[in-house]
Structures are given as structure tokens and as C-alpha cells.
Image (cartoon, helix red, strand yellow):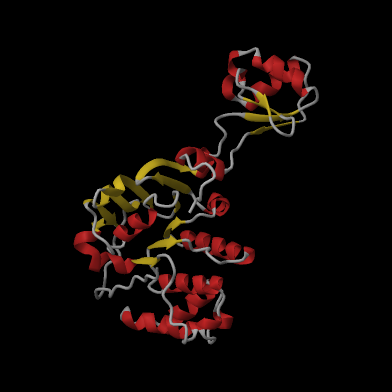
Amino acid sequence: MVEKVMTVPEMNTPRTFTGDIVLRTNNLTKQYGKRVAVNNLNLEVRRGEIMGFLGPNGAGKTTTIRMALGLIAPTAGSVEILGQEVATHGSRILPRVGALVETPALYLYMSGRNNLRAVASVLGGVPRSRIDAVLDLVGLRARQKDRVRTYSLGMKQRLGVAIALLQDPDLLILDEPANGLDPAGIVEMRDLMHRLTAEGKTVFISSHLLTEVQQICTRVSIINLGELVKVSTIEDLISGHGEFVVTLERAQEALALVKAHPWGKDARLDTRGALVTTAPGKRGRDLNLFLVDAGFAPDTIAQSTQDLEQVFLELTNSGTGEIQ
């Protein structure tokens, strides 16, 4: 499905919003007949962060994004952007939002630059300097005169992001922005997202590339079957529940010793033979002291972390299903 969001800005749209919550959903619900696509969703995205929006196929991610952009109306609840409800103030507030939803709609027979000029004319005009700036931001200045039909999938995706940036938006909503990018392009996109937030912009990003989400996002929101199941910082989500990974000699003996104590009853050896356990006092230094006093000298002690994909699958009961 090809979709593009274009709104004509009101003249002199004020930029006076000073709150911390840039995007908020209030009991947001969307129902199609008897099927509930989004159920009572309450979500907040803070100014200056990169919020990842994750969920299995059919979880309600794209439906939520479409309601946020005023493309479809909610069955119940509301969406606020920059402190104003989209349903009643969309023409005022949506020009301050840049969006890339699914596949960008592009004119394949036109050059990349002329695509930007065409969209700019619909938006009421954008200075040439701004077109130059977004072409530089997405790394397409060298190919700006080439017809879009000659672009790779990744280049088309970057051009879609450039369109979303034309009006220098406060909030950027991106659905799979790394789609089709090669490893170098993914790194460039990651750097772009960080540059935008350093400038004070806010990014709300839906992606199935969980390893990339783990590197790029400040926080993540995970939904399943239309309901919010987790909101967390990346650090807290992959923290490993207070466990430590200890490499040492005679690991099997150390395991038996640790399991004899209440705080270490769930200790185990991982696939590399390292000891994984919580610690007395929940501190690594206390675990080190305990092991040394017992005659075991750890080579290394590090806080255990989980892979975001593993956490995602556990929270959504996705098994080995698709994570898109």
C-alpha cells in the first residue's frame, strides 16, 4: 500500500509549545466491526527522544500511526500532538509533523530534487535552501538530478525521509525508515536520527530491525493485539534482571556454592561455561568479595544483558513468528 501525508500549513503557524509530551494517546481505540485493532492505548512520547514502537504483525502499530496523523478516525479516545488534539486542530498541528508511512509515494519519472519541489509546492512552498539541506541530510545530493526510477529501494526510502523533513518538523513519525537500506545506509540513517534529536526534534519510529532499535532508540513501547504491554528504556529492558556474568576457573564448583544461598538459587552456567547469578546485596562488588573469600578468583564480572529480540519475543509470546 502506498501512502503519503501532505497537509497545507496555516499561515504563521505558531511554534510556542513548551511541554515535555510531544505525542500522547488517550484511551485510543480503533475497532473494525467486531475486531479491535487498537484497544485503550495510553502512550506518551517525550520531547527530544527517539521512541521505538514495536509489535508483531497485526499488533496495531500502523493503525495507531494513521490515527495519530489524522488519516483515520479513532472509534474512541484521542490523540494529542504538541498539546493539541489532532481531531479538532489537525490543520494547525499536522504541518509540524513529518511522516513516512509504509512505502513513500514518489514520482518515478522525475528526479529526486523535482520530487521534493513537487511536494513543496503542495505544502505552500519551501525555500530552495531547505531542499538543499534535506538532500544533504539524507545523503542524496549527488543523485538529486537522477530520475527516481533509477534509485535503489534504500535511496527511495531516504528520499521519503527527505520529504518528511521538508517543513523542518518538530515531530518525525517514521514507519520502517531503514527498509531496503544496506548496512552503510542503516548507519547513516541512525546518525541522522541522532542529529535530529540533538537539534531538539522528536522521533517516533516503527521498525522490525530490533538490533537497530536497540542501538538507536531512547525508549521503546511494545504493543501486542492492540494493547500496550511494555514501555521502558532500552537499558532497563535488556538489563538482565540484576544478574551478573562471571568468568572464572572451576565454574561448576562455584555454581554449587552459589546455589546453596537464597540469593543464588537460580544461578546457572551459560553456553560458554560462565556463571550467571544474582549477587548478595545486588552489587557486583559483593559477589566478587563472596567468591574471593570462598577461594574463587573471578577473571571478569559484568552485568548480564538480554538481546532486545529475546525480550520482545517473551513479551509478545511471538515464538519464532515474524516481528514486523
Q: Would residue 107 appear left or right of 263 to someone viewing this image?
A: left
Question: Residue visible at 63% across and 65% down?
Answer: 184
The residue lying toward the viewer, choosing from 152 and 135, is 152
317 is higher (above) or lower (below) than 162 = above
The residue lying toward the viewer, choosing from 76 and 11, is 76
> Where residue 148 sits: x, y (%)?
51, 82
16 is higher (above) or lower (below) than 218 = below
Question: Residue visible at 67% across and 17% down?
Answer: 258
> Where residue 202 sits: x, y (%)?
41, 58
Q: Quadrant of the N terminus?
A: bottom left
> Where residue 283 sits: x, y (%)?
61, 25
The extreme right residue here reads 249
Question: Residue visible at 52% across and 41% down?
Answer: 319
Quadrant of the rendered image containing residue 301: top right
Q: Would residue 204 appear left or right of 86 to someone viewing this image?
A: right
* Observer able to see residue 68: yes
The residue lying toward the viewer, choosing from 313 and 159, is 313
> Where residue 228 sits: x, y (%)?
37, 43
* Observer able to see residue 126: no
77 is higher (above) or lower (below) than 297 = below
Q: How many marks?
A: 0
